[in-house]
Image (spheres, rainbow, N blue to C red):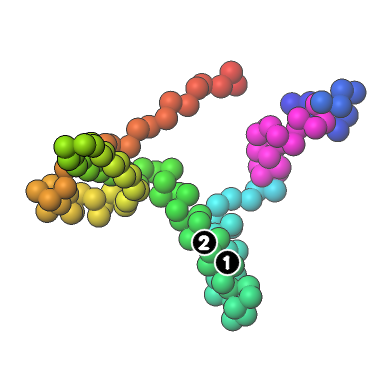
Amino acid sequence: MEDPRKSSRPNDVIGGFFGVEPFEAAIKASRFDIQEELEILIALVRDPDPKVALPAQRQFRAMLKDVAGANGYFGSIEKTQRSSSEEQFIEQKMSTNVLLSNLRRDNEQDRQEIEYEVHEPVEAEIPESDA
């Protein structure tokens, strides 16, 4: 990969900030990994100063949510309610995201009360790179 700092074209320099390759090279060169990131974040969560610990806890929870979502731990429920009278017909649709383990556990109990369909997570197809 060509060093974008040595490029004569300005778009290569600017575009380098939005590509994956420079980040990949920097992470590899510094030998930074997810374990180190989590150790740092956990140390901040355990900090006795609430001004440090509370934002770190929010960041930790956000990271957990991102990882759970990326690994298919969440599903969605759609609920449709229909009601009609002589003059009008009303259809209300609601959708919510749930933790799949909770959804599966409660699925049988709720099926009698609420009509909904459970959709399995869909895996995204990642195009092969030309590496």
Q: Secondary structure at mark 2?
A: helix
Q: Are marks 2 and 1 in contact (CB under 8 Å)?
A: yes
Q: Secondary structure at mark 1?
A: helix
Alpha carbon distance from label 2 to label 1: 6 Å
For this view, does 28 lie left or right of residue 114?
A: right
The part of the chain drawn in magenta is 12-29
Q: Give the residue type at disc 1.
A: Ala
Residue 56's disc number:
1
Residue 79 placed where, x, y %?
Answer: 25, 43
Q: Quadrant of residue 37?
A: bottom right
For this view, does 86 lie left or right of residue 43?
A: left
Q: Give the residue type at disc 2.
A: Phe
Residue 83 placed where, x, y %?
Answer: 19, 42
Residue 60's disc number:
2
Residue 53, magenta (yes or no):
no
Q: Nearer the viewer, residue 43 or 74?
A: 74
Residue 24, magenta (yes or no):
yes
Please tell me which residue is depicted at 32% across the width and 37% down the height of the picture: 121
Tell me the quarter of the image containing the N terminus: top right
Residue 102 in the image: above or below residue 89: below
